[in-house]
Structures are given as structure tokens and as C-alpha cells.
Image: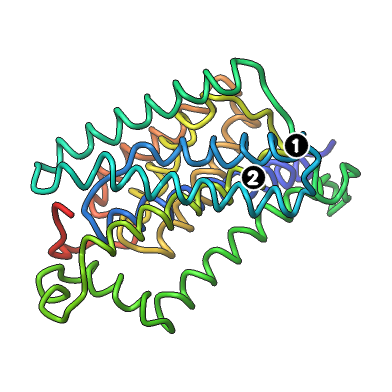
């Protein structure tokens, strides 16, 4: 394989990885913009989405129904997390709330181990496994589903926040909690919705990536860290920034693993994080104080 073909193959792989990281990053900023909380349980939503869909499919549920059912169940789990773990700690420091999400992540992972065990699980590809040739690179059909999911999620979020009353209420809390409260918007309800929405986004990412990798109870930890890095690279408050950050991390990771060494694959994201924090602390798309806190 010629060098340019190798680079093209790594680029395709990077865009696929970046799409997954972008969806996870969108989940991070959805919660952060409304509540000011960095939810380190976000990766567990991805794990739940994948494993619940696989469990439903193995019980003879059609793949489409398994997809929708997995997203719905995970969304409810995200809402339950906000009500059970976050809401009782209202008024606590940001550090305390972050520690709560880390504890929730460990708890969900433990429940995942009890439920599914340590064995890996797989989900059939949505459109078959036959690679598609493109300029010397081989693209598996599932990559289009992953990339398409990112585009649909991004477009759906834009339409929701721009054109719906609920979306505008969420945006109001993201801009200024006190002013939103004075306008009759319940910050607590918006916080609940942001956790549910974030969990649903994570589940979508988990389901579309499940046919490309083996799903395990502990798959969420590294995915959450890379989604977190992507969100920081994008500025942590910008939806387009989260997507750009996800693609950047995915492409650099794929290129580094292919052209340098696969041993550096997981380290590349954190090298990028350090460089961004050193050169542009607010991320590539900047950042601002939104007046959030303690929801």
C-alpha cells in the first residue's frame, strides 16, 4: 500500500473515531452548559447504550427497536442519576459534584460487571461488513452510520436549541441561571433534562460504535476521558467546538498510531490536551463565564 493510501486509511479511521468522541463531548458540554458540572459518568452512558442494545438484540428484539429502546432506557438512567445523586447535593461545591459523578461512574461500572460480566459482546453491523473502496482506502459501512449519527445529533441539537421553547429554556439557563429563574424557568428541571439528554447522546454513540468494537462493562472510562479532552479542546461551551475537538483527537490519534506507534495511541489525546491548555487555555473556540452553578 502506497504512503498516500495509508494516510487516507488513517484519516478515514480517524474521522470514525472522532465522530464517537464528538458525540461524547457533546454530552459533556450539554450538562456543563446548564449545570456547571463536569459529568465523568458520561462514558458509562456509552457503555450502557451499547450493552443494553446488545442484550435486547440477543433476546430477539429487532435492531431498530433495540437501538431506540437502549437510548430510552439510558436516558431514564441519566435522569435518575441527576435526581438521586446530583439534586440532593444542590449547593455543594463544584469539586464535590464532580466527585459525585466519579462515584456514580464507578457504581454504574460495577453494576455493569454484575449484570453482563467481564466478557466482551458484539452487535451485528447495521449494513453488512463488506468494505467499500475509496481512493485506495477501505471503509466499512458502519463508519457511515457513526459519522451520520454525529451529523444527525449535531443538526438535531441545533434545531432543538434554536426552534423549540424547551430548547430556548435550556439555553437561558446556560446563559444566566438567575435571569432564567426570574423568567419562570425552573433550573432544576432544566438540569434534569440536560442529564437525560446527555445520557441519550452517550447511548447513541454506544450503539453505533458497538458493531465496530467489542462492548465491555469497562469500555466507558477511556472513551469518557477522550470525549472530555475533545470538549476541552473545543472550548467546553461550544457545540461546534466539541465536534471539531472530537475529529481533531480522532484523526491525530489514528495518524499517530499508524505512522508512529500504536503504543502512543491513548497518549496522543492527552498530549493534545496539554498543548491546548498551554497555548490556548480557553480552547480553540474560546469560552466564557455563563453564570451557571450548583443546579
Relative side of 129 to 208, left or right: right
Residue on which disc 2 sits: 207
> In the picture shown, does residue 60 fall above or below 293?
above
Q: Which mark is residue 100?
A: none
Q: Nearer the viewer, residue 94 or 262?
A: 94
Mark 2 secondary-structure assignment: helix
Report how far apart the C-alphas of labels 2 and 1 lie in the structure.
8 Å
Q: Nearer the viewer, residue 286 or 55?
A: 55
Q: Quadrant of residue 101?
A: top left
- Seen at 59% across and 15% down, the residue is 118
Q: Position of residue 44 (x, y in %)?
A: 46, 35
- Seen at 47% across and 57% down, the residue is 244
Relative side of 184 to 42, left or right: left
Q: Quadrant of residue 269?
A: top left
Badge 2: how crowded within 10 Å, few (<14), some, or many (20+)? many
Residue on which disc 1 sits: 123
Q: Nearer the viewer, residue 1 or 89?
A: 89
Q: Quadrant of residue 217?
A: top right
Q: Position of residue 97 (x, y in %)?
A: 19, 39
> In the picture shown, does residue 78 fall above or below 160?
above
Relative side of 142 to 295, left or right: right
Amino acid at each position: 500500500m502506497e504512503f498516500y493510501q495509508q494516510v487516507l486509511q488513517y484519516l478515514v479511521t480517524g474521522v470514525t473515531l472522532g465522530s464517537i468522541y464528538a458525540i461524547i463531548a457533546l454530552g459533556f458540554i450539554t450538562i456543563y452548559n446548564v449545570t456547571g458540572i463536569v459529568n465523568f459518568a458520561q462514558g458509562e452512558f456509552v457503555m450502557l447504550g451499547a450493552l443494553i442494545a446488545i442484550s435486547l438484540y440477543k433476546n430477539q428484539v429487532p435492531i431498530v427497536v433495540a437501538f431506540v429502546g437502549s437510548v430510552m432506557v439510558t436516558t431514564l438512567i441519566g435522569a435518575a442519576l441527576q435526581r438521586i445523586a446530583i439534586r440532593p447535593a444542590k449547593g455543594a461545591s463544584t469539586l464535590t459534584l464532580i466527585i459525585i459523578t466519579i462515584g456514580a461512574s464507578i457504581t454504574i461500572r460495577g453494576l455493569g460487571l454484575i449484570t453482563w460480566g467481564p466478557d466482551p459482546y458484539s452487535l451485528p453491523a447495521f449494513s453488512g461488513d463488506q468494505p467499500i473502496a475509496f481512493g485506495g482506502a477501505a471503509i466499512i459501512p458502519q463508519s457511515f452510520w457513526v459519522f451520520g449519527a454525529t451529523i444527525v445529533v449535531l443538526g438535531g441539537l441545533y434545531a432543538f436549541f434554536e426552534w423549540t421553547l424547551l430548547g430556548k429554556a435550556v439555553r437561558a439557563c446556560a446563559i444566566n441561571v438567575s435571569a432564567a429563574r426570574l423568567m419562570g424557568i425552573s433550573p432544576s428541571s432544566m438540569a434534569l433534562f440536560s442529564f437525560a439528554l446527555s445520557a441519550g447522546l452517550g447511548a447513541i454513540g454506544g450503539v453505533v460504535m458497538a458493531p465496530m468494537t467489542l462492548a465491555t462493562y469497562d469500555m466507558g472510562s477511556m472513551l469518557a476521558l477522550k470525549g472530555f479532552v475533545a470538549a476541552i479542546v473545543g472550548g467546553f461551551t461550544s457545540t461546534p467546538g466539541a465536534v471539531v475537538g472530537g475529529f481533531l483527537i480522532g484523526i491525530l490519534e489514528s495518524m499517530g498510531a499508524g505512522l508512529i506507534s500504536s503504543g502512543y495511541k491513548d497518549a496522543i489525546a492527552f498530549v493534545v490536551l496539554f498543548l491546548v491548555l498551554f497555548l490556548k487555555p480557553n480552547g480553540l473556540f474560546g469560552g466564557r463565564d455563563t453564570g451557571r452553578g450548583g443546579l
